Image (tube, rainbow, N blue to C red):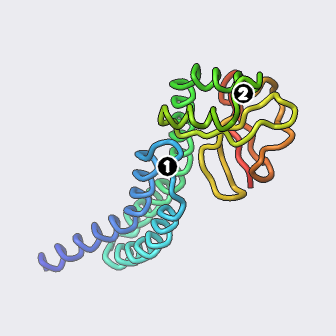
Amino acid sequence: MEENQSVRSTTEITGIILFLFPGLLFLATSLFQGIGQANPFILLIIILLGGIAQIVGLVMYLVAASNLKIKLLHIAAGIAFYLIILPVVWAANFLKEMVYIEAHQEELEIIAEDLLANRISIETANEMLKSKNYLLQVICIPKEQKHVLFILGGLIDNCVGFSYSLTDKRPSENCCGDLIKWTKLKRRWYKWGTT
């Protein structure tokens, strides 16, 4: 009887760990990566393989646990955990972006203002950014000459980056697809995204 209870407890704990592990792995991967280092393929693998682990863990737990109230409490806590992961990751990414802009604001604004005044070319600006090991590259200056779009990362037509803007309006073009996101970070700085 005692040995049977020990096996049941071990199975319950293993089930809970398997159920929560993909979420914890996703959270850790998202929180500890640097800005612009998200690899969507790694996150997709975590989610897909993690889904299998979650199902196995949930079934193991449901079979092993005997107290219905405790089962429901643990399942509700697990669901709550998964519901708060994305807001936590979004908030952490926003803070990382703000810290990055704050840390490099002076140099980036000098480059942006030189570009808008035609004192340097986009190629020269990108060489300057590369020499300082910045994660950003200038992707374009829209025709109205009021924005400098820095790309942080992305695919051919799905990009994300920051914009130095002399106006509060979206640029007329962005050189990387349809602009769907334009979020103010601070004075003259916006985060943009395309699809």
Query: Picture quarter containing residue 181?
Result: top right
Neighbour class for label 2 at 10 Å: few (<14), some, many (≥20)? many
Q: Position of residue 169 (x, y in %)?
A: 84, 31
Q: Foreground mark, 2 or 1?
A: 2
Residue sitting at the far left? 2
Left or right of 161: which side holds 174? Answer: right
Looking at the image, which residue is at 61% across and 37% down? 126
Picture mark count: 2
Q: Position of residue 83 (x, y in %)?
A: 54, 54
- Residue type for callout 2: Leu
Q: Which mark is residue 37?
A: 1
| Between 36 and 85, the one nearer to me in the picture | 36
Left or right of 3: which side holds 45? Answer: right
- Residue type for callout 1: Gln
| Between 29 and 147, the one nearer to me in the picture | 147
Label 1 sits on a secondary structure element that is: loop
Marks 2 and 1, how far apart in space? 26 Å
Q: Position of residue 63 (x, y in %)?
A: 35, 79
Is 45 drawn above or below residue 108 in the view shown?
below
Q: Which residue is mark 2?
A: 115
Q: Position of residue 44 (x, y in %)?
A: 52, 66
In which quadrant is the C terminus drawn? bottom right
Left or right of 126: which side holds 54? Answer: left
